[in-house]
Image (spheres, rainbow, N blue to C red):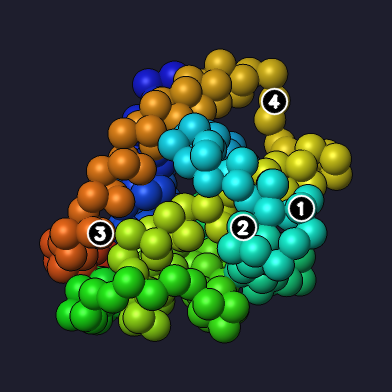
């Protein structure tokens, strides 16, 4: 992988992590178009690094909310901050279980599975259309909501299903306020990304060779900067109920991906 390719993939990750169009799906499509020949493990490693960059951009945008989560955890008082922190933890559990029990199976889905990506993009389009039709409310995320949103996040570990699209759509369909749904969606993934990076570093599974460091670093920086821009933009779009535009986009890209996979 050269530097330009890494930057392109970084920008794609930074934009699509927050927009409900599946960052992992777009990365897999971009790798196929750019002729990336990484084996699934290396492909997933680069994807995780780029997700780490966008997790950092989330921390920058939501630094006040992140501080409130930490304060809530260590106050040990049954207040709104503590309850919100517990909801974030609860939402992480399904993805943690799936990630730990099916890590090798998940790795096999990365590295050129274009047909799978196309089908999952169509599923994402359907979710976004349903959410766009839902009525807006001012409800907060409940504990039961956190469980269901967590399940949708676990399912969205498949490339092509938008994590933000799945979690925001699930929240909105459950009657949660759109702005609160977007913020919860972006915050709930941060601990998972940091946990995945920490696990891979400690276990030695982070397959980064010295020759890869410059392009990976370039991709990391590109994803971080693009993520800063896309995060605020997405919150504004969700508030204005513009999810149907992304549904159309996902349907078009998904159909093209399926056609490409079947014809090549």
Q: Residues within 10 Å of mark 3 (few under 14, many from 20)?
A: many
Please report whichever mark, 2 or 3, sits nearer to the chain's N-terminal start: 2
Q: Badge 4 local density, few (<14 within 10 Å), some, or many (20+)?
A: few
CB of mark 2 within 8 Å of CB of mark 3? no
Alpha carbon distance from label 2 to label 3: 24 Å
- In the rendered structure, are the residues bearing label 4 and label 3 in contact, judged by CB atoms less than 8 Å apart? no
The answer to whether mark 4 and mark 2 are in CB contact below 8 A is no
Q: Nearer the viewer, mark 4 or mark 1?
A: 1
Q: Secondary structure at mark 1?
A: helix
Q: Earlier in the sequence, mark 4 or mark 2?
A: 2
Task: Identify the secondary structure beneath mark 4.
Answer: loop
| Residue 209 disc label | 4
* Distance of label 3 from label 1 (alpha carbons): 32 Å
Q: Residue at x 56, y 58 (%)?
A: 188
- Measured in 3D between alpha carbons, the distance from the residue under mark 1 to the one under mark 2, in whole angstroms, is 9 Å
Q: Earlier in the sequence, mark 4 or mark 3?
A: 4
- Neighbor class of circle 1 (other Cα within 10 Å; few <14, some 14-19, many 20+) is few
Disc marking residue 81: 2
Q: Quadrant of residue 94?
A: bottom right
Q: Which mark is residue 11?
A: none
Q: Which residue is mark 3?
A: 238
Against 132, residue 62 (above or below) is: above
Q: CA distance from mark 4 to mark 3?
A: 39 Å
Q: CA distance from mark 4 to mark 1?
A: 43 Å
* In-front residue for pair 48/142: 142
Look at the numbered disc 2 and give the secondary structure of its residue.
helix
Q: CA distance from mark 4 to mark 2?
A: 42 Å
């Amino acid at each position: 992988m050269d530097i330009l390719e890494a930057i392109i993939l970084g920008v794609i990750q930074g934009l699509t992590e927050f927009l409900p169009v599946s960052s992992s799906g777009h990365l897999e499509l971009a790798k196929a178009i750019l002729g990336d020949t990484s084996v699934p493990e290396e492909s997933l490693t680069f994807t995780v690094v780029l997700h780490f960059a966008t997790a950092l951009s989330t921390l920058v945008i939501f630094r006040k909310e992140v501080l409130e989560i930490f304060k809530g955890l260590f106050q040990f008082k049954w207040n709104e901050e503590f309850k919100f922190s517990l909801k974030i933890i609860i939402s992480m559990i399904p993805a943690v279980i799936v990630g730990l029990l099916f890590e090798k199976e998940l790795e096999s889905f990365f590295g050129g599975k274009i047909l799978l990506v196309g089908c999952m993009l169509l599923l994402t389009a359907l979710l976004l259309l349903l959410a766009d039709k839902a009525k807006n409310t001012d409800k907060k995320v409940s504990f039961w909501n956190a469980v269901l949103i967590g399940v949708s996040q676990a399912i969205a570990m498949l490339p092509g299903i938008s994590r933000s699209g799945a979690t925001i759509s699930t929240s909105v369909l459950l009657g949660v306020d759109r702005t609160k749904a977007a913020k919860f969606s972006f915050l709930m993934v941060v601990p998972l990304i940091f946990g995945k990076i920490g696990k891979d570093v400690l276990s030695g599974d982070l397959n980064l060779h010295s020759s890869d460091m410059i392009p990976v670093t370039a991709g990391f920086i590109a994803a971080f900067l693009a993520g800063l821009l896309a995060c605020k933009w997405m919150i504004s779009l969700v508030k204005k109920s513009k999810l149907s535009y992304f549904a159309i986009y996902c349907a078009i890209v998904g159909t093209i991906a399926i056609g490409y996979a079947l014809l090549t």
